[in-house]
Image: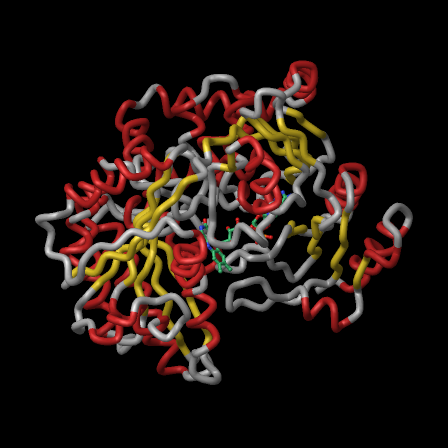
Amino acid sequence: MNRDKYFKLFNALKKFIPEERIYTDELRRLAYGTDASFYRLTPQIVVKVKNKKEAKFVIEQCAYFETPITFRSAGTSLSGQALSDSVLMLVDRGWREFEISEDASSITMSPGLIGGHANFHLNKFQKRLGPDPASINSAMIAGIVSNNASGMTSGIEVNSYNTLVGLEIILADGSILDTTNKKSREDFAASHPELIEGISRIANKIKGNEQLRQRIVNKFSIKNTTGYSVNAFVNFNDPIDIIAHLMVGSEGTLAFLSKIKMRVIDNPPQKASTMIFFPSVEDACSAIPQLKRLPVNAAEIMDRQALRSVEDKDGMPELIKELPASSTALLIETSAFNSNDLRSNIEAIENSLKDEKILAKMEFTSKPNEYNKLWNVRKGLFPSVCNSRPVGTSVIIEDVNFKTQDLAAAALDLQGLFKDYGFENTIIFGHALSGNLHFVLTVDFSDPNQLNNYENFMEELTSLVVKKYDGSLKAEHGTGRNMAPFVKLEWGEEIYSIMKEIKELFDSKKL
Ligand SMILES: Cc1cc2nc3c(=O)[nH]c(=O)nc-3n(C[C@H](O)[C@H](O)[C@H](O)COP(=O)(O)OP(=O)(O)OC[C@H]3O[C@@H](n4cnc5c(N)ncnc54)[C@H](O)[C@@H]3O)c2cc1C
């Protein structure tokens, strides 16, 4: 650690950023050494920026002093990607201006706007953001886009990538590109010929190789946030549009997002939910293809362990405590613009599932005070496991995705794997409608045996997801630190080296 370099950088930052927003004291550096994951890294300097000029200045100074910089918005990332042992640049909570377009079809946001706040303002137009992570009341829009977050209802159709209109970015050399502005696009193309050329070269390589192109299309037919969004090379022709979409899911490794414009989606006001209990995980998963054809916004799976962890929470049906050992629930939501349509939706769902093996009568509620309780319990699953973990253990949440036709077999394989490695208390939950499963396990990393066991588990898990099912190691949480060593395993040598080429193109020395 070159302390002298950080001292010089601190003195340089002070010339433009008020000193009370540059933290070098041990306590605050330690406090910012955590995000919502189990990782800890202590930054040397934490600096809070309130606007584009400040962000540009800090980025330029870090490039000048050749010092790594990491960005952070709300810090709710689950795998350590909002952490740094160098410079951590925070988006100030006050940096949250927004503008809704006149026809309410899109919203332009500053990076620090909290997703839930955007939705509060959009709700007046019966609209909302496409991505809907369970953390939306804390997560900021820059973090949502940088992780390519999706959530319970968004699937891939309206995730961050597919609802992005354009953005303003600050690159490692301090240059600014606003992809929504014609002049900015032209000026940028003229000032950065090597980057544009590099992006075009990769695009031609992918488009000229049908096997490679198809591989990318297939991989992104399900949720995927492992590595970079290389689908940008397939979906867009203009290098500037490719650059814009490469930012989604790039976890702050390519540029800083200083403004984000997104298409918004309908938010019908009438909603109804029910929790359906199936005798087994296979029965629950086999209902998914049917539910996908119905007016169902979300189908959240919770296995027996997950149900057990929340059975005492307010609003949970009493019968959960009596359910058999392998039972599995789907919490589903449907919505409509009026109560007649809502009724029809409910009837369609009830009729369609009437021959399924279900343990108790399906009862929809359209009362917000009742269905909100169910959804709050679902959203609180992960924090509730964190609270009840054995002392000394760390909580790891993972986020894999399978094709929905493979979901049942894959869920059973996962349960088998947890048993083999002694993680019997692991809970499985997630966005089953998209084939996205989360699991939460606890490990004491100070115990060498547990560490070794975890390492072996990860090898077997990644091999299962990639080799047996051709699934995604990361569906929506961003690659993060736990899966970073397995990006090559998932994508193979050729696409992995394209991802490395992308990173090199955006490095300050190349710009
Ligand atoms: C309880 C809980 C539930 C969750 N549920 C979901 C879920 O359902 N679905 C889901 O997808 N995710 C979920 N998450 C994960 C996480 O909340 C989301 O990924 C969220 O979008 C991250 O937003 P953030 O503002 O906290 O970003 P941060 O964690 O601060 O940052 C995320 C990434 O973006 C980068 N970054 C931050 N700001 C910028 C910027 N201005 N420019 C460039 N890069 C930047 C960071 O370096 C980091 O790599 C959940 C997390 C928790 C704790």
Q: Is residue 223 above or below residue 230?
A: below
Which corner quadrant of the image does residue 452 belong to?
Answer: bottom left
Task: Name the residue furthest front.
Answer: 340
From the viewer's side, name the closer residue of 149 and 326.
326
Instruction: Answer above or below: position of 389 versus 223.
Output: below
Total numbered labels placed on residues in the image: 0
Give coordinates of residue 334: x percent, y percent: 33, 42
* Near-viewer residue (397 or 503): 397
State the quadrant of the N terminus.
Answer: bottom right
Residue 94's x, y, as percent? Answer: 75, 47
Which residue of the protein is positioned furthest toward the right in this rendering? Answer: 15
Residue 79 locus on image (x, y percent): 49, 59
**Which residue: 45% across, 57% down?**
369
The way the protein has been coloured in the rendering is secondary structure
Q: Quadrant of the C terminus?
A: top right
Residue shown at the point (26%, 64%) measured from the top left: 303
**Could you say where residue 187 lies in the image, as x and y percent from the top left?**
70, 17
Task: Name the residue at 55% across, 31% down.
Answer: 125
Q: Is residue 401 visible?
A: no
Q: Residue sitting at 21 percent across and 46 percent down?
A: 288
141 left or right, relative to 322 = right
**Residue that extends furthest to the left in the rendered view of this protein:** 355
Residue 450 visible? The answer is: yes
